[in-house]
Image (cartoon, rainbow, N blue to C red):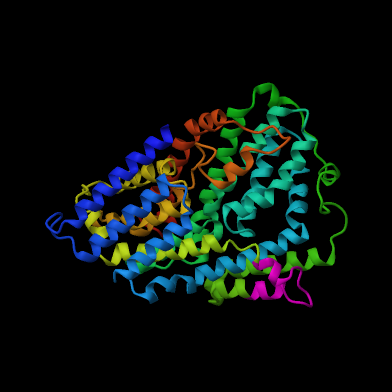
Amino acid sequence: MTLNLRQGVTACLALSLVALLAVPGNFPGLGTDARITLAVFTLATAAWIATPIDDTYIALGAGLALTATGVLDSEELFAPLGDDTVWLLICAFVLAAAVARTGLAGRAAAFLVGGARTVRQLVHLTTAALVVTAFAVPATSGRAALAMPVFLALAKVLADRKRLVVMLALLFPTVILLSAVATLIGAGAHLITVSVLWESVGERIGFTEWLLIGLPLAIVSSHLAAEVVLLTTTRRADRQGPVEITAEQIQEHSEQPVTGPWSAAETRCASLLATVIALWCSEPLHRVSPAVVALIGAVVVASPAIGTVRLKDALKTVPWSMLLFMAATMAMGVALADSGAAKWLVGGVPLDLSPWVFLGVVVLVSTAAHLVLQSRSARSSVLVPLVVAAAVGAGVNPVAAALASTAAAGFCHTLPASAKPVTLFAEIPGVPTYTPRDLLRLSVFLAPLTAALVLLFAVAVWPLLGVPVR
C-alpha cells in the first residue's frame, strides 16, 4: 500500500509539473530547450523512483527523447561512451576479472584477518582489506561479489558466535559503500560527477586528484563506521572473547588456494596490478592517462602468453548495462547544464548563505537522497548538475560542492534495497545475517556521523589538498 501510494503521488507530481511546463505562458524566462529538458528529467526521475522499469532503459529513453527534440545532437548523446573515464572503467573490470580468477583477493584477506586476536582487531583488519579492494575492483557491486567468498569462510569459522557473524555481514557492505570514494573507479557516480564538472565549469579531476581527495575520507569514514557497526550490533560479551582465525581454516571453506606458495599466475597478476596502481598514482610524473595505463594492463593480463584470463571471459564481467546508464545520464547532465535548466532551477533558491551552510545543505540532501532514488548513479545524475549550478550562484567552489554531494551519497544503508551490496549481504542462505531493524539502528548513528565527516573534510581538509571552499 505504501509503495502504491508513493508511486501515485510521484506520478501525479511529475505529470502536473510536465503539464505546467507545456504551457508557454508559465515560467517566463525559461527557454524551449530548458522546458523540454526539465520535462524529460522530471519524467525520468519519477520513473526511477516509482516504477520497476530498468534504470538503464529509462536513461536511454530520456537521452533519446532529448536527441529527438533537438536539445542534444547525436554526437552529444554518443560521446560519453568514448570518454576516457568509461574506458578506464571497462579496463579496470578486465583487471578485476584477472584478480578474481587467480584468487589473489582471498589470499590477501586470509593474510590480513589471520593476524586478528580480538574482535576489534578482526573488524579493523577486515575494514583495511576492504578499503584496499577499491583499487583493484571497480564499482561497489563488483567488490561485494568478490568479498562474498571471504565473508562466507569467516562465517563458517565463527559459526558458534552468531552475533559476530551478523556483525560481519553488516560490516562488509557498510565499508564497501563508504570506501568507494577512495578512487575514481570506486563507483559509476564518480564518473558522472567528473563529466558534469568538465562540461559545466571546465574542471577536470583525474585519478590522482581524486585519490588525494577521496582516500583520506575513505579511510577515516570506513574505520569509524566499523566501530559503529561493532558497537550497535554486538554486546560487550560478544566483543570480549578471543578470536583465532588461521589461513588454514579459511582455506577449508574457500575454493581457491589462500595458503602455500604463490603460483606463477598469481605472481604475474600481482606484479601487473601493483604496476598499474603505481602508474595511476604517479600520473603527474609521467603524464600517461589512467585510461591508457588501464588499457595496457588489460591487454597484458589477457594476453595469450603471460595473461591469466581470456579477454572474452573478462569482458563478460563488464556491467555493460551500467556503462550505458552512465553514458546516457552524462548526456542528460550536459542537456541540463547547456539548456539553462539547471541554472533556472536553482535561480529561485536563496543562495546568500555562508559556504559551510551551503555545503551542509548539499551534504544533508545528498545523504537522504537514497531514500528516494536507490540508484547511486541516478542520484548523481540528478543532484550534481543542480549542485554545481547552485554553487556557482552562491560563490562556492563547484568542485568542492560536487565532491561533497558525491561523497555524501555513499551513505545508502537505511533499507535492504538501498544499495546492491546491502541487498547482497542481507539474504544469504544458511548464514545468519542482519535484519531491516539492524539497518535502521545502524543508520540512526551512521547517517549523521558520515554527513558530519564529509562536511568537515569539505570545509577543513580538502582546502589543504587544493580544493578550496570558494
Screen quadrant of the C terminus: bottom left
Choose top left, top right, bottom left or bottom right for residue 364: top left
Choose top left, top right, bottom left or bottom right for residue 139: bottom right
Q: Can the viewer see residue 73? A: yes
Taking the magenta stretch, the answer to whether it contains residue 314 is yes
Instruction: Residue 371: give x, y in percent of width and height.
Output: 43, 40
Q: Is residue 70 above or below residue 442?
A: below
Front-lying residue, 343 or 373? 373
> Which residue is rendered at x = 47% and y = 41% of the image?
450
Judged left or right of residue 282, residue 43 is: left
Front-lying residue, 274 or 249? 249
Q: Which residues are magenta?
A: 296-315
Instruction: Residue 1: give x, y in percent of width and height.
Output: 42, 31
Judged left or right of residue 178, residue 68 is: left
Give the mark count: 0
Q: Can the viewer see residue 403? A: no
Instruction: Residue 446: give x, y in percent of width and height.
Output: 50, 36
Instruction: Residue 439: give x, y in percent of width and height.
Output: 54, 33
Taking the magenta stretch, the answer to whether it contains residue 285 is no
> Which residue is rendered at x = 51% and y = 31% of the image?
440
